Amino acid sequence: MTRVAAVDCGTNSIRLLVADVDPATGRLVDLDRRMTIVRLGQGVDKTGRLAPEALDRTFAACRDYATIIKELGAERVRFVATSASRDASNRDDFVRGVLDILGVEPEVITGDEEAELSFTGATAELTGRDDLAKPYLVVDIGGGSTEFVVGDDTVRAARSVNIGCVRMTERHLVRDGKVTDPPTPDQITAMRADIEAALDLAEETVPLREARTLVGLAGSVTTVSAIAQNLPGYDTEAIHHSRVSYDRVREITTSLLNSTHAERAAIPSMHPGRVDVIGAGALVLLSIMERVGATEVVVSEHDILDGIAFKAAEG
């Protein structure tokens, strides 16, 4: 097995996985897996630039991760950056900072590449399961974008569209620099229309309705699962491969969109960095389930980060 370090830097969070990986068998053994909310994409949708304070937060997390990578002796490091850095006019500042700290240049990947990595990470463990019909639709709801991938054992079609939880919150739920608590009906209606338009774009490329199993990835989906299970705290083992019905997702989404910041923050499994954006993320998930007619979503803790690790081990 090869010891690798994978870093996934998105719009809302930066995550690290150090693992021993055997690409030939699809086996991956975690040594360290962690997440830091850095909001790299703060204001990018409006300004087109990465904010100095967002870069500072991201570089601080990179320094912490560099220490862990060195201590665990990873043989290979791969750093992938997604939506926010892809969109920013000053992304060279980001690239230089990461290179100085971690010694590797971040790969600012395309939406299609992001989708393929997500599919690899999410489905490696599902092969051979009789209870989950193919093809899979893997949906990775990030901060700035959402990736859609349909495939069996390999990817058949993929598309990335700009409807992440942070982007939708900043675009529709912020007034005078503050998140509206709770959102107004008009704000929710506008956000829903934006999501539906993006789903139309995704469906031009990806046969969403052909999928037999919906697999949901990333923090918005896992948080909805934690809420659905009434977990006393965030529990990875309980969340991984849990199933949440459409009715439960609809109930949770309605509750989140009608709650205040304090009420959302009081949910035991809620990460502080998701309090303001979880309503938008849940609405994206609900809209997808309605579009494809899914009766449930299978929730995976393994996603693009695991896909990055598999590809790093392959060299």
Image (cartoon, rainbow, N blue to C red):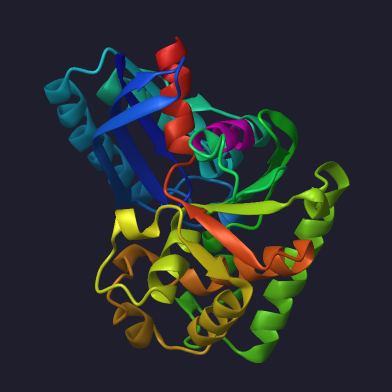
Say whether residue 43 is visible. yes
Report the magenta stretch's main SS. helix
Q: Furthest residue to the left?
A: 71
The stretch in magenta equals: 114-121
Q: Is residue 272 left or right of residue 229?
A: left
The residue under the point 31% across, 14% down is: 1
Residue 252 rendering spot, x and y as whole percentages: 51, 80
Q: Quick one: 235 or 142, which is closer to the camera?
A: 235
Say whether residue 275 is visible. no
Q: Is residue 30 above or below residue 35?
A: above
The residue under the point 70% across, 64% down is: 294
Q: Is-magenta flag for residue 9?
A: no
Q: Quick one: 251 or 167, which is closer to the camera?
A: 251
Q: Furthest residue to the front?
A: 130
Q: Is residue 168 above or below residue 266?
A: above
Residue 154 rendering spot, x and y as whole percentages: 68, 28
Q: Is residue 313 left or right of residue 16?
A: right
Residue 118 rendering spot, x and y as whole percentages: 55, 38
Q: Furthest residue to the right?
A: 204
Residue 28 rendering spot, x and y as whole percentages: 36, 28
Q: Is residue 224 above or below residue 94?
A: below
The residue under the point 23% across, 34% down is: 65
Count of picture labels: 0
Q: Quick one: 42 or 253, which is closer to the camera?
A: 253
Split into 4 quadrants, where in the image is the C terminus?
top left
